[in-house]
Image (cartoon, grey):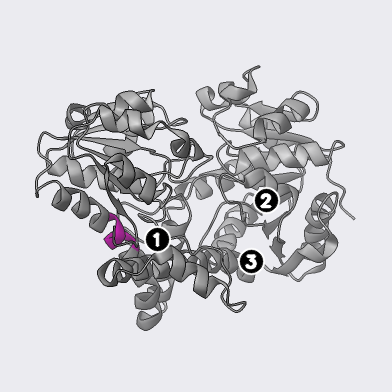
Amino acid sequence: MTKISKICCIGAGYVGGPTMSVIAKKCRDIQVTVVDLNEARIAAWNDPDVNNIPVYEPGLGAVVAEARGRNLFFSTEVDKAIDEAEMIFISVNTPTKTYGAGKGQAADLKWIELCARQIARVAKTDKIVVEKSTLPVRTASAIKDILAHTGSGCKFQILSNPEFLAEGTAIEDLNAPDRVLIGGDSTPEGQEAIQALVDIYANWVPRERILTTNIWSSELSKLVANAYLAQRVSSINSISELCEATEADVNEVARAIGADSRIGSKFLKASVGFGGSCFQKDILNLVYIARSYGLEEVADYWEQVILINDHQKRRFAHQIIKSSYNTVSGKKIAFLGWAFKKDTNDTRESAAIYVADHLLFEQAKITVYDPKVPESQVYSDLNYLGSRTSDENRLGVAVVDDPYEACKGAHAIAILTEWDEFKEYDWQRIYDNMNKPANVFDGRNLLDVAKLKEIGFQVKAIGKAC
């Protein structure tokens, strides 16, 4: 039976960094090396002050501080780590393609292929290669094909071990996961590789929560899990618009239906829309796969989840414009929050980016405050859309490190991230320093509407007739 003593993880991002840190903490007898070609990112992971590590996640700093230098290492020496490891995790980005066949839907697997080719080039001994990135079904066959033709005589076993982390609670999710999913081949060698990974997780995860499947089921399960969760968000968001039209309260509706044990209460919080690196990308991937098999009705069904999410973001921006006498030209709109959710500095697919983009086309002046997102990231996110030049972004957007400064002189405030600190602000002070009428557009149903209205604010909250 294979006993793993050295692990290499290629990719030091939001999945690789936290996952490997927890494995190192829980498995002191295993040397874990996280590698990345981004020197600045690796330097940040090695910063003596764990408050400066590149991924903000509650509890992560303490885990890194405990394991780093003992059996957890961050390095740019990719070849060396690959050569020494018995098990290699691939945890690189798999964004939606922006070019060629499948543009806008299929996953871009160029980084996965480059990892496979690098492993094939460097490896001198047998390896277990673990897919940790979210991948379309049957990606493992492509990795296996590349590794099988190395000519080195090395044998490779490919496993699928998708992550089910929620950013903001990733350390909790890693410490006590609902399940760990491992897919592999049914051959004796494949089963031995599966058991090697099972044994690692069994150091802290109850065996009944470690599920083993064939590799294709594991790959598809990740996409379907995210699609189901996103579907719930889009469903309640579609109802939020109906609530506003009928003077119902979406929070009361969500509480009522969530009390049904067949439905449950999770992922029923209406908002300006879901973001993050997984939901949209994985659903689009699922849509692309369905269409590639000629399953048009299946593809249309899941694509509607994305369309409702896009509609919700546009609708929120239109509310701001409509409530500003149908023009925001030259008006200051304060954005509180830029990250796609609280307790993370991840901004990928954040609703704030798209709301800002829409308002900028209407010539609004936007001032952004987020407690964890730096100015450079805000401009980078707007550049990523490719809808305007970087100079145009800077002309319309300012980023400040003081929420009261962000709101000073604003015509409206948009709550785009549900940071807890926003609830504790001196909203009377904010009101006193705003242009009147002072509008608050609560895209996260975070604030007490009655108290804001008592101060004098005009309030629009998702799913409420305010």
Residue drawn at 27 percent across, 29 percent down: 432
Which residue, given by chain and number where applicable, does mark 2 sit on?
A: 173
The answer to which of 236 and 63 lies nearer the viewer is 236
Which residue, given by chain and number where applicable, does mark 1 sit on?
A: 106
Instruction: Write down the quadrant of residue 380 in the picture.
Output: top left
Instruction: Write down the quadrant of residue 160 in the picture.
Output: bottom right
Residue drawn at 66 percent across, 46 percent down: 89
CA–CA distance between discs 1 and 2?
A: 28 Å
Among all residues in the image, which is located at the extreme right? 1
**Image quarter hosting the N terminus:** bottom right
User: Is 324 drawn above or below residue 251 in the view shown?
Assistant: above
Magenta span: chief secondary structure:
helix
Which residue, given by chain and number where applicable, does mark 3 sit on?
A: 218
Rendered image: mark on residue 178: none
Q: Which residues are magenta?
A: 309-313
CA–CA distance between discs 2 and 3?
A: 18 Å
Q: Which amino acid does the dot numbered 3 rest on?
A: Ser
Instruction: Write down the quadrant of residue 366 in the picture.
Output: top left
Residue drawn at 31 percent across, 51 percent down: 98
Residue 141 in the image: x percent, y percent? 58, 63
Secondary structure state at the residue bearing disc 3: helix
Mark 2 or 3, nearer chain start: 2
Residue 88 in the image: x percent, y percent? 69, 45
